Image: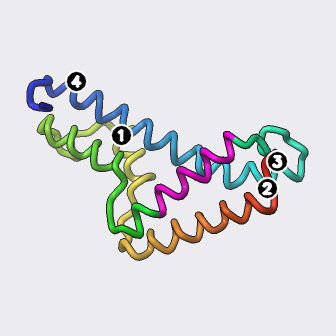
Amino acid sequence: MLAVLPPSVLILLADLVLALHLGIILFNLFGLIAIPLGAWRGWRFVRRRGWRLLHLLIMAVVALQAVAGRACFLTLWQFALTHAAGAGGSDAPLIRRWVESVIYWPLPPGFFVALYLAVLVYAGLLWRWVPPE
């Protein structure tokens, strides 16, 4: 199905997936910092149940994918789109290479399993320390 789309469209879709991936990562990191800081500073949004549930759910999905030994589905989609376009990493625009270097670290999978599980535990503890309303 991807083969019917022109390479430029596939690259655009891959870039959109990469931007979404970066946005989700930033959302997760923001929540891990904003929740305890917001509790201390009295920010009401850090206690909104929907926002907190979304944050915890995304953290759980990330951790479960790592435990299952699977790459993030957004990573797989981006790779499939880039591969279908016939594009390699070397001719990618500078901003894409920079964002990919921020997102994709060349470390063993076990590191990420431990990291994501620790972050999930922390997010769960934040639910108890700063309970949503």
Q: Which amino acid type is shown beneath numbered disc 3?
A: Gly
Between the residue at mark 4 and the residue at mark 3, the CA separation in whole angstroms equals 41 Å
Between the residue at mark 4 and the residue at mark 1, the CA separation in whole angstroms equals 16 Å
Residues tagged 4 and 1 counted as in contact (Cβ below 8 A): no
Which residue is label 3 attached to? 38
Look at the numbered disc 1 and give the secondary structure of its residue.
helix
Which residue is label 1 attached to? 96
Between the residue at mark 3 and the residue at mark 1, the CA separation in whole angstroms equals 32 Å
Q: Quadrant of residue 91?
A: top left
Marked residue nearer the N-terminal end (4 or 3): 4
Q: Is residue 24 magenta?
A: no
Give the mark toward the camera: 3 or 1.
3
**In what quadrant of the picture does the C terminus appear?**
top right
Image: magenta residue range: 50-63
Give the mark toward the camera: 4 or 2.
2
Q: Which amino acid type is shown beneath numbered disc 4?
A: Val
